[in-house]
Amino acid sequence: MIIENHKHLTEVALDAMQQTPDPRLREIMTSLVSHLHQFVRDVKLTEPEFQTALALVNRIGQLSNDTHNEASVMAGSLGVSPLVCLLNNGDNGATETTANLLGPFWRMHSPRVENGGTLLRSPTPGPAMFVNGVVLDQQGRPVAGADVDIWHSSPVGLYEQQDPEQAEMNLRGMFTTDENGRFWFRSVKPAGYPLPVEGVVGDLLRAQNRQHFRPAHLHVMIVKPGFKTLISQVYDRDDPLIDKDPQFGVTRALAGAYVRHDEKAPQDGVASPWYALDFTFVIEPGESRLPRPPIK
């Protein structure tokens, strides 16, 4: 096809997308090309800017490896990851949801822990935290027998893969909800942590005068046949960065109350102060499947 001008170019490219046999891929690629071409026109993209953009995309790929996923962090920093989450949960964006981002540190095969047990597998200094969770369906009925995968950072903001001082699978555990949909455990209060800023994401945040620390949170994944896998994070609503998350992950439904207590703890040998978190998760009907681990 001989191209006549820039408008004709877009027409020809869209026509080529229409030849895609798979209907869903055809829909996606047609919309993508249409929006990309319009974006170039809207911002009047220059040739040097285009070359810079290509170099940045290449750099994102070069920075992604078995221990770091730059593309995933960038998707969150642009608000794309939370947008996909909100549009695919809560009755496809119609209602509030307890779904949230997977994050970069989830691992498969967390060790089984009985309700009331602890996530600590090595000494982890910090205030104790007692979590009581409930899993309900959309009608408010308890969901028994659901697997609840928990993981979180330490009180100094490090996950066990990052910290040689922590034992393997420290601050991780797999629970099963009881007949009332409940699960409960002891851990330590997590801290917020910085995004890696040595690469393209860091360059973006600095260029936009944005800070790079995430507010403290607890990761939760709930799996039960007949229900869509719920991936969630419960944020500390008193964290000073609760309204400045560089990944745009904090929603009103996920701002949890990590309540400080100065009285005697509910377990012996636990010093004060300690914290309590009570939270209810709502899961939707759908396909039960695990995500792909972001890193090894």
Image (cartoon, rainbow, N blue to C red):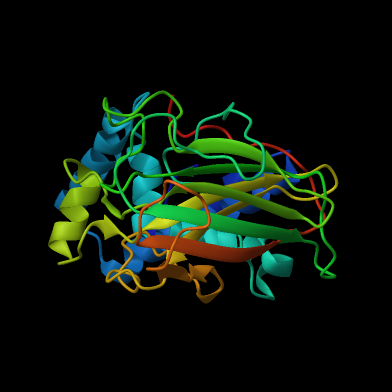
Residue nearest the observer in this picture, 249 or 72: 249
Residue 88 lies, in percent from the top left, at: 65, 60
The image shows residue 292, relative to residue 277, as above or below, that is above
Work out whether residue 35 can be spotted: no
Residue shown at 61%/58% (left/top)? 132
Residue 276 located left or right of residue 162: right
Residue 210 located left or right of residue 105: left
Residue shown at 48%/71% (left/top)? 257
Q: Quadrant of the C terminus?
A: top left
Residue 262 lies, in percent from the top left, at: 37, 68
Work out whether residue 172 can be spotted: yes
Residue 120 found in image quarter: top left
Residue 11 located left or right of residue 162: right
Residue shown at 25%/49% (left/top)? 201
**Number of on-image labels:** 0
Residue 185 located left or right of residue 4: right
The image shows residue 181, relative to residue 152, as above or below, that is below
Residue 167 lies, in percent from the top left, at: 38, 25
Residue shown at 41%/68% (left/top)? 263
Residue nearest the observer in this picture, 29 or 208: 208
